[in-house]
Each structure stands twice: as structure tokens, then as C-alpha cells.
């Protein structure tokens, strides 16, 4: 999209497009982009998907000892602690992160997918519309997969 806009502006600046043509074509691109979110949510074989995940945003684990687990991930995977406390710790991995939460039994706490154009209200409405039961916590939206594993959807991490 950015390349198309740059191309149009360059053509305008070289006198190959009039101002009216530039505005008309930019308007056409904007109209095409407004239709893009619906197309972007198509899953395999063109079927409608509730969301179009763009990446795994983060993984959250329940661990029995925050300090021990944090040290493990720092030493063996080179993750860097960005925030830590007695019941949680967050470690960076590029633009993604690993969250550790203290619990009695170790395991997967939840995992999160980045969603383009994420808005919590919209996410909740989409989940309800397809028969899922969203759990909104502030700007975070969670729901369960068929096996009861908690899934979160979110905006992409700034990185």
C-alpha cells in the first residue's frame, strides 16, 4: 500500500498526474483498504475466520518458582528480564515476550496472537457472534480453545 501511494505521489510530482487524478486514485486506494479487513479475515480455502492472526504475540507459563524459571530462560535462551515481581516476570525475545506467572502446578497459562487492527470491543463482538465466550480483562480479551486452553488476542507488540 505504501509503495502504491509513493508511486502516485511521485507521478504527481513529475507532472504525470493532475491533482484531480491523484485525489481520485488515493480515494480509490482508501476505499479498497476499507474493504481489506473483511478479506484479511479469510482463513484457509477462503472461508471466513473470526480473526486473522499475524504472529504469536507471547506465551505465558505458570511456573512454581519465578526466580528459578527466569534464570533458566536468561541463561539458556538469552531472554532479558523487562519486569519482575514475586508473582510474575516478563522476559523479552525480540519484539515478543515470555510471561511467567507463579502457580502451584507448572504448565501453559495462556498464549496470545497478534491481530491486525485489534480493538477489544470488536474482538468481544466477533467472539460472541461465533458462539464463543470471551473474557475481557481491561484491554485484554481471552477465550478457550476446544480443549479449554486459554487463548488471548491482542494488538501487535511495539518493537
Image (cartoon, rainbow, N blue to C red):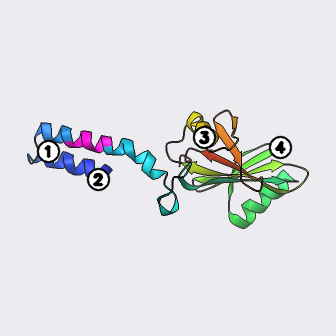
**Tag 4: Cα neighbours inside 10 Å, few (<14), some, or many (≥20)?**
some
Residue identified by numbered label 2: 3
Magenta residues, start to end? 25-31
Could you say where residue 82 lies in the image, as x and y percent from the top left?
Answer: 68, 47
Could you say where residue 114 lies in the image, as x and y percent from the top left?
Answer: 57, 50
For mark 1, give the secondary structure: helix
Residue projecting furthest to the left? 15
Q: Residue at x 36, y 44 (%)?
A: 33
Alpha carbons under labels 4 and 3: distance apart:
35 Å
Alpha carbons under labels 4 and 1: distance apart:
58 Å
> Which is more N-terminal, label 3 or label 2?
2
Alpha carbons under labels 1 and 3: distance apart:
45 Å
Which labelled disc corresponds to residue 28?
none
| Along the line of sight, the residue nearer the viewer: 87 or 18 | 18
Residue projecting furthest to the right? 104
Residue identified by numbered label 1: 12
Could you say where residue 101 lies in the image, as x and y percent from the top left?
Answer: 80, 48
Task: Please determine whether, in this image, residue 5 is positioned above or below residue 45.
Answer: above
Could you say where residue 30 lies in the image, as x and y percent from the top left?
Answer: 31, 41
Amino acid at each position: 500500500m505504501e509503495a502504491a501511494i509513493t508511486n502516485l505521489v511521485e507521478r504527481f510530482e513529475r507532472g504525470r498526474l493532475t491533482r484531480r487524478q491523484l485525489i481520485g486514485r488515493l480515494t480509490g486506494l482508501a476505499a479498497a483498504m476499507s474493504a481489506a479487513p473483511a478479506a484479511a479475515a479469510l482463513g484457509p480455502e477462503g472461508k471466513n475466520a473470526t480473526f486473522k492472526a499475524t504472529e504469536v504475540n507471547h506465551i505465558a507459563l505458570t511456573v512454581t518458582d519465578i526466580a528459578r524459571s527466569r534464570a533458566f530462560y536468561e541463561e539458556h535462551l538469552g531472554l532479558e528480564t523487562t519486569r519482575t515481581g514475586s508473582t510474575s516476570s516478563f522476559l523479552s525475545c525480540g519484539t515478543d515476550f515470555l510471561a511467567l506467572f507463579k502457580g502451584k502446578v507448572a504448565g501453559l497459562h495462556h498464549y496470545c496472537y497478534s491481530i491486525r487492527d485489534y480493538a477489544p470491543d470488536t474482538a468481544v463482538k466477533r467472539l460472541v457472534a461465533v458462539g464463543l465466550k470471551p473474557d475481557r480483562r481491561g484491554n485484554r480479551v481471552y477465550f478457550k480453545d476446544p480443549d479449554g486452553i486459554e487463548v488471548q488476542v491482542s494488538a501487535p507488540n511495539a518493537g
